């Protein structure tokens, strides 16, 4: 390089001697304009940095170019195989581009990100970073209710059940995203390290569509537990069915939307076996069912035990409470509470209610001597402020 520079300098001096000593013009081209200066090299910064380890497969792969334009980005695994992906257009936030894979990166793998850019003169520059993704101790895919594609009543919350305890509840909750065709408020509430529910402050609006995006793949849930995959569950909220079963008046009022459509005489739980107060959520419907006291801890052969076949059984809690046909108590229905906690009706009335009902409907029991429901889906018995306090993000 030094030799080349000397030869060029000598040529310039000779050229100056042929121009009547006008040394101040010797370095200019004949049109009188100065030669353009060479453009500064482009600079590239990539993230994650080289050598980064134990990253989430969802880690954002970012490229920032200064003094030039990004021309190519590749990501290859440790075998050199390129991973298909695209670069998102840089937003107006300082020129950060993001490379997005067509399929998520894998756990426990090594990748190399290579970016190329050019300055204004077209001179290329390259930067690369090799990083590794985390290797989970355990992965989990939660169970979700309601099931995808189903129609439920206005009282059905979204329930997410994990097989193992979630240490980082906030991380899980941030990636459980609920949207609906009619915007509503709503909050998650953790019942335990393995169970979290979502509901609005009031019952869902009727006839709307709701989607849960459980984007848990690549999410560190704490304690070595990571999300195994993403899930999407969409369901429809159907007609608004809310019934009020009053153990004091021995009547049940059934509403379809805002319209009272039926008033039935009932017999609720006896003083020895009172029904629980509060909103109950319909979860199961059986045309025929055998009521068995042993399912809630009372042996069939004990003085208070029973094993009785019934028709048109609509389950409203896991405490053994149903709305069902009880032809043996018709004389007491409308007058006296004699059941073991269920809502007794005549066979004709129970059939009508069975055919009217859907999972997620609400049956609110009032006027009983028992406490408030605290089993199965008792979400609506929890005051809204208390419910919100159960969120890991509050």
Image (cartoon, rainbow, N blue to C red):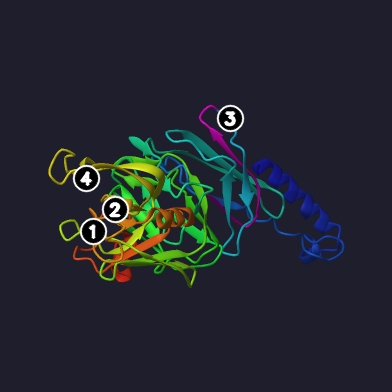
Label 4 close to label 2 by CB (< 8 Å):
no
Q: Can residue 394 be seen in this view?
A: no
Element carrying mark 3: loop
In front: label 3 or label 4: 4
So how many labels did they put on this image?
Answer: 4
CA gap, disc 1 to disc 2?
A: 9 Å
CA gap, disc 3 to disc 1?
A: 68 Å
Q: Which label is found at residue 269?
A: 1
Q: Nearer the viewer, residue 195 or 378?
A: 378
According to the picture, the residue beneath numbered tag 2 turns out to be 321
According to the picture, the residue beneath numbered tag 3 turns out to be 81
CA gap, disc 1 to disc 4?
A: 15 Å
- Left-right relation of 154 to 332: right
Label 3 close to label 1 by CB (< 8 Å):
no
Label 1 close to label 2 by CB (< 8 Å):
yes
CA gap, disc 4 to disc 2?
A: 10 Å
Residues in magenta?
61-79
According to the picture, the residue beneath numbered tag 4 turns out to be 296
* Quadrant where the image shows the C terminus: bottom left
Residue at the image point whose x is 60% and y is 33% from the top? 82
Q: Indicate the quadrant where residue 373 lies.
A: bottom left
Element carrying mark 1: loop
Q: Residues within 10 Å of mark 1 (few under 14, many from 20)?
A: many
């Amino acid at each position: 390089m030094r030799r080349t520079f000397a030869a060029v300098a000598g040529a310039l001096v000779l050229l100056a001697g042929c121009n009547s000593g006008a040394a101040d013009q010797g370095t200019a081209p004949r049109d009188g304009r100065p030669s353009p200066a060479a453009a500064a090299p482009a600079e590239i910064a990539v993230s994650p940095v080289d050598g980064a380890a134990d990253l989430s497969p969802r880690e954002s792969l970012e490229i920032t170019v200064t003094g030039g334009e990004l021309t190519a980005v590749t990501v290859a695994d440790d075998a050199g195989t390129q991973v298909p992906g695209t670069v998102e257009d840089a937003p107006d936030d300082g020129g950060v581009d993001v490379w997005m894979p067509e399929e998520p990166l894998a756990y426990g793998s090594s990748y190399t990100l290579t970016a190329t850019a050019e300055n204004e003169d077209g001179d290329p520059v390259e930067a690369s970073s090799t990083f590794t993704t985390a290797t989970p101790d355990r992965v989990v895919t939660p169970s979700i209710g309601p099931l995808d594609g189903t129609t439920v009543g206005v009282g059905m919350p979204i329930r997410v059940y994990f097989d193992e305890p979630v240490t980082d509840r906030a991380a899980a909750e941030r990636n459980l995203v609920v949207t609906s065709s009619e915007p509503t408020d709503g909050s998650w509430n953790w019942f335990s390290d393995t169970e979290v529910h979502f509901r609005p402050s009031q019952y869902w609006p009727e006839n709307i569509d709701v989607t849960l995006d459980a984007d848990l793949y690549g999410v560190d849930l704490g304690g070595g537990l990571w999300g195994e995959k993403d899930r999407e569950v969409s369901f429809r909220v159907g007609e608004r069915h809310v019934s009020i079963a009053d153990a004091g008046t021995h009547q049940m009022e059934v509403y379809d939307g805002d319209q009272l459509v039926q008033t039935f005489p009932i017999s609720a739980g006896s003083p020895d076996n009172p029904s629980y107060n509060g909103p109950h959520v319909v979860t199961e419907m059986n045309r025929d069912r055998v009521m068995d006291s042993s399912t809630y801890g009372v042996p069939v052969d004990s003085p208070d035990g029973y094993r009785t076949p019934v028709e048109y059984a609509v389950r409203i809690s896991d405490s053994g409470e149903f709305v069902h046909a009880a032809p043996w108590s018709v004389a007491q229905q409308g007058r006296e509470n004699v059941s073991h906690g269920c809502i007794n009706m005549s066979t004709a009335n129970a059939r009508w209610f069975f055919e009217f009902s859907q999972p997620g409907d609400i049956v609110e029991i009032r006027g009983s001597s028992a406490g408030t429901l605290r089993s199965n889906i008792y979400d609506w018995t929890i005051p809204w402020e208390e419910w919100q306090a159960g969120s890991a993000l509050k």
